[in-house]
Image (tube, rainbow, N blue to C red):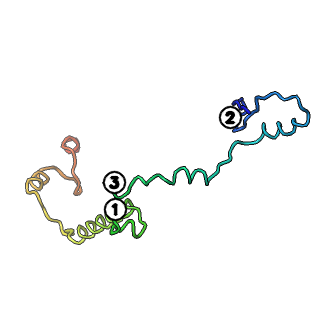
Amino acid sequence: MRFTIKKEAECGLLEDDDDDDDDDDDDDDDEKKLSLNLSLNYQEVLDAWSDRTLCADESSSIFVSANNAYVRMGEVPVIEDERRRREASVLRYKEKRQTRLFSKKIRYQVRKLNADKRPRFKGRFVKRVAEEMHK
């Protein structure tokens, strides 16, 4: 029996090409036309692949050690790395917070000298042009 793929094959249906004029076989032909071709014999697949070896056998250079924490615990390494990164970030934040200087300390003397030279009005810096207009 020969099958060809027709337009119905887009949905996974197969159509029979044999032209039988028997009326009693019409029901069987209709069933064949509407059935999906999804049968799979798992035992045959297992038998066919049973003589094959795994990709990562003893002779392979790629292997996973049993001491690897991710293998033993079933954790994904990305999550573990992200957690370490987050812990380090929080630790840096806490250290910076503890060493903050709440008292006003002048770090650059030049900035203080320049700020003292600039005109101020009610404690805020103002432009020189605005100051001359008020005089």
Badge 3 element = loop
Q: Which image quadrant is residue 34 in? A: top right
Residue pointed to by mark 2: 10
Residue pointed to by mark 3: 60
Badge 2 element = helix
The answer to which of 107 and 8 lies nearer the viewer is 8
Q: Amino acid at mark 2?
A: Glu
Residue 51 in view, yes or no: yes
- Find residue 133 and report its horizontal and vertical position in percent: 22, 41
Q: Amino acid at mark 3?
A: Ser
Left/right of residue 48 with respect to residue 18 in the rendered view: left
Cα separation, mark 1 vs mark 3, equals: 28 Å
Q: In the displayed structure, would residue 116 be above or below residue 98? A: above
The residue at 70%/37% (across/down) is 11
Badge 1 element = helix
The residue at 38%/66% (across/down) is 70
Q: In the displayed structure, would residue 125 be above or below residue 80? A: above
Numbered-mark total: 3
* Rendered-image quadrant of the C terminus: top left
Of tags 2 and 3, which is closer to the observer? 3
Q: Amino acid at mark 1?
A: Asp
The residue at 78%/29% (across/down) is 18
